[in-house]
Amino acid sequence: MARSEPPPSPREQQQALPLSRDVLVAYGLPMAAFMAMTIPLSIYLMKFSVDVLLISPAAMGLILGLARLWDAITDPMAGYWSDRTHSRFGRRRVWMLGSTIPIGLTLWMIWSPPLALEGSLLVLWMAAGLLLYETASTAMIVPYGALGMELSPAYHQRTRLFAWRHVIGSIGFAFGMGFVYLLRTADDPRTDGWGIALAGGLLLLASVGFSVSRLKEPAGHQGRGGVRPRRAFADVLANPHARLLFLVYAAEAFGSASISALSPFVMQYVVKAPELLELFVASYVVPQFVFTPLWIRVARRIGKRRLWMLGTLPLAGGFGLMTQLQEGSTGLAFFLVMLIGIGSGIASVVAPAIQADVVDYDELRTGERKEGAYTAVWNFIRKAGWGVAILFTGVFLEAAGYEANAEQSASVQRTLLFLVGAVPAAGYLGGLLLLTRLRLDEAEHRAIRTALQDRSDLAARNSEARDDPS
């Protein structure tokens, strides 16, 4: 007879109280604005740069790769400083609000370079704009991700929180694709891009301002970050659950990076239906929005890890079959991207919830709260993998003979399908194998939370005894 789990204690029941809808919405809105800004960058910037600005694919791939690598390098320091920040607004919100204006200014640099610039000067301008943008966005997204891990200690409430964030973020996806459409159909995208930058910056400022005004950070976490950077990140690397997730992110990031940058190329030069690009990407987003409530319920039944593993199957299969695309295969393209959207939706819901559980394990080991450090290292792994992948994407396209605004050779088309299909499929299969080794489940997390609460209660009783000599 299977051993049943003991019922939750009153203290555990209190911790598991549902997050209010106001908190869920306030936390999700900045993700919508962030997605509205980043979707055009990830989907259309490569094509905008090579076909409108006439920068070579290799040069633009190098710029994008270096920008993402720089972004990955700055993440750890942003995470450490966020953990150590003391202010009346808490550790995270002051960073989120302070980064909004610099992000808007750097978006203007990227989408509306001066018309007088060309050649090497234009390359330098774009490189500077992207490096500054990645620095400013790191100062926002790392503390923002860390804040989400602190809003609830409850195992399933974390899944619910990040599910809401994902759904609200999908709305930002729609805005982002609207921006892509405007850029793709503009008579002169180089001069019209300033409007995209202005709209994105204002959306971010409004959403972050609302979020900062409504959310509260746990007062007990102030001053409990890592004391020294080297020790803080040594603790992160010493966490066995975190190390495993690092490998999963590396495999999946390197595998999936090309899909966003290469979708416009595949739709124009392989499927030969560039006018369907926005619908193609919408087919990726809609399943994520529709099925998110289902993933919350399934996670309660089978656990977050098993659900994440289940989600890698449509990802690996959908990407793998992308290699079969050809001219006119629009139906297959839309079906495959819907499969990929289903798998991506699962990962977007459960992965950050598992990250928060891993941070609790670190607190049990070290007595510190280092959400920023953990968020930074996870982002470092993901962005470094993305940067390396996009760098090689530009190099491979150049080597295959890519020519701007022209019909592409069979060699270029095969290269596109290899990068958009076989490489991501291999990455997700690797992630699936790694996830089979993850052992942090609901029962272990309950034991961690109980031990942390017992430690807190003991410290409170000792403090009372010192204050009351009688």
Image: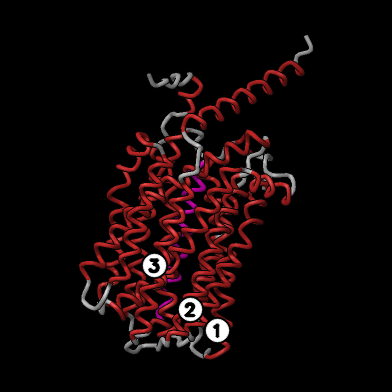
Please, which residue is most extreme toward the right here? 469
Q: Indicate yes or no whether the magenta region holds residue 396.
A: no
User: Marks 2/1: CA distance?
Assistant: 15 Å
Q: Amino acid at mark 2?
A: Gly
CB atoms at circles 2 and 3 under 8 Å apart?
A: no
Can you tell which of label 2 and label 3 is closer to the viewer? 3
Mark 2: which secondary structure?
A: helix
Which circle's residue, 2 or 1, is located before the other in the chain?
A: 1
Which circle's residue, 2 or 3, is located before the other in the chain?
A: 2
**Residue that mark 3 sits on:** 422
What residue appears at the point 42 percent right and 67 percent down from the top-left corner? 423
Which circle's residue, 1 or 3, is located before the other in the chain?
A: 1
- Disc number placed over residue 123 in the picture, else none: 1
**Residue that mark 2 sits on:** 394
Measuring from the top left, give residue 275's x and y in whole percent. Answer: 25, 76
User: Local crowd at mark 1 within 10 Å, few (<14), some, or many (≥20)?
Assistant: many
Q: Indicate yes or no whether the magenta region holds residue 210.
A: yes
- Can you say whether 52 is above or below 251 in the image? below
User: Local crowd at mark 2 within 10 Å, few (<14), some, or many (≥20)?
Assistant: many
Give the dominant element type of the magenta stretch: helix, strand or loop. Answer: helix
- Can you say whether 450 is above or below 319 in the image? above
Give, as a single range, the part of the protein colored magenta: 191-215
